[in-house]
Image (tube, rainbow, N blue to C red):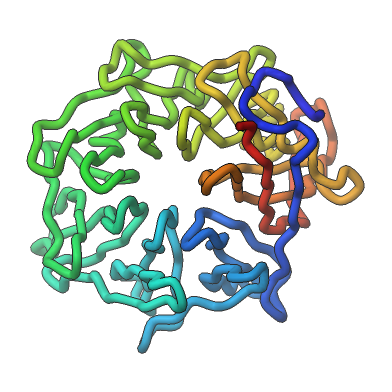
Amino acid sequence: MAGKPGVSGIDPESWRVTILSLPKRFTRGTALGFCGGHAVGRAEGGRGKTVACWWPGGEPELLTVKGQNVLGVGNARGDTIPGQWTNASGAMGAVAWRFDGKRLVAAELHDRSYESTWAIAAGNGVAVGTGRPNAKKGEYARKVGLVWRDGAKPMVVAAAGDVSLMATDGEQLAGSIHGRASLWPSAAAAVIDLAPGKMPMSEVQALDGQLQIGVAWKDFCARAGIWRGKAASFQDITPKGFQTARAFDGTEGYQVGFVRKKDTTRNGSTGDDNRAVLWQGAPDKWFDLNALLPAKTYNSSVAWAIEIRGDVMQICGESRRYEMSHPGTPQEAHAVPVAHPVVWTASLKN
């Protein structure tokens, strides 16, 4: 068994790793979520070209929206893929794809009373994201949270600062207000400020029942954590020996993300030696998913999403090879020439 033995409830001999294939003429990619049990993400090609895709049956298929060529996806969940199109001027419009068990159906969510909208996350058929209202020249329009249900006009979640909705379970909403982790028990409820004391920068990125999952910054370093409905409940789950970590998703008491030994390189740039991990609600209950990857090809990874169907756990993300030049010097630099979508699977114990 790879990594720490602190995660329970999983058959340690059942772990399997699948490196997903990419569409033709694309060389890089990542898997960001699941729809209908299938991985969803993006592929990258030459000259910066990026496409949205998913992997039904393990093979890549491009996602499409009529009249739009540049598409992105967010954290797919259940039967919904949130995302957006981007036009030549840089404006964005929210979209979503719904899976009816046989095929995906695209739906335009963009409200033209907004300069831009984008859908970030989904839960129980509800999509959430952010919009920037049209503003008069010279004025700043605060971003608002948007909630899309069953084709209706989006419900607006506004505040005194910029709102980013990053998670929903169909009822609760979560994200941040002007860089402070925030929770709404419902779209109509008063917001709960979750920003931990002495850690004013924070955000919630996923919901798991009464748990909120995300990150808070301590001394400019990201620390993975979970909340239980109050700012004072924040629990840092970054394992000992790692300076930084981020948690992106969670379900049934498990969380996924990555850890990194050092937050930055000697020259102050962000490091790329990430290791995908699975947590079980505590800093000493974690499992090193990176150790399961083929070591000759990959030495770095990120886990973006997790789902459990029956007794099978699926985790998706990105498997990478990073290369280092001038290690340990002020000129140290990291590059990532290889990045492929990956799915880890395991069986849960009865």
Quarter placement of the N terminus = top right
Report the residue at 11% width, 61% height from top. Answer: 135
Along the line of sight, the residue nearer the viewer: 214 or 262: 214
The part of the image, by quadrant, that contains residue 67 is: bottom left
Quarter placement of the C terminus = top right
Report the residue at 71% width, 80% height from top. Answer: 24
Horizontally, residue 306 falls left or right of residue 337, namely left
Which residue appears farthest toward the front when viewing the image? 350
Along the line of sight, the residue nearer the viewer: 272 or 267: 272
- Tell me residue 33's x, y (percent): 51, 54
The part of the image, by quadrant, that contains residue 7 is: top right
Horizontally, residue 40 falls left or right of residue 109, namely right
Along the line of sight, the residue nearer the viewer: 197 or 341: 341
Q: Is residue 143 visible?
A: no
Report the residue at 51% width, 33% height from top. Answer: 247
Rendered view: 16 above or below 61 = above
Rendered view: 261 above or below 295 = above
Horizontally, residue 51 falls left or right of residue 129, namely right
Rendered view: 236 above or below 112 = above
- Tell me residue 38's x, y (percent): 55, 62
- Tell me residue 254's x, y (percent): 52, 31
Horizontally, residue 270 falls left or right of residue 4, namely left
Rendered view: 62 above or below 261 = below
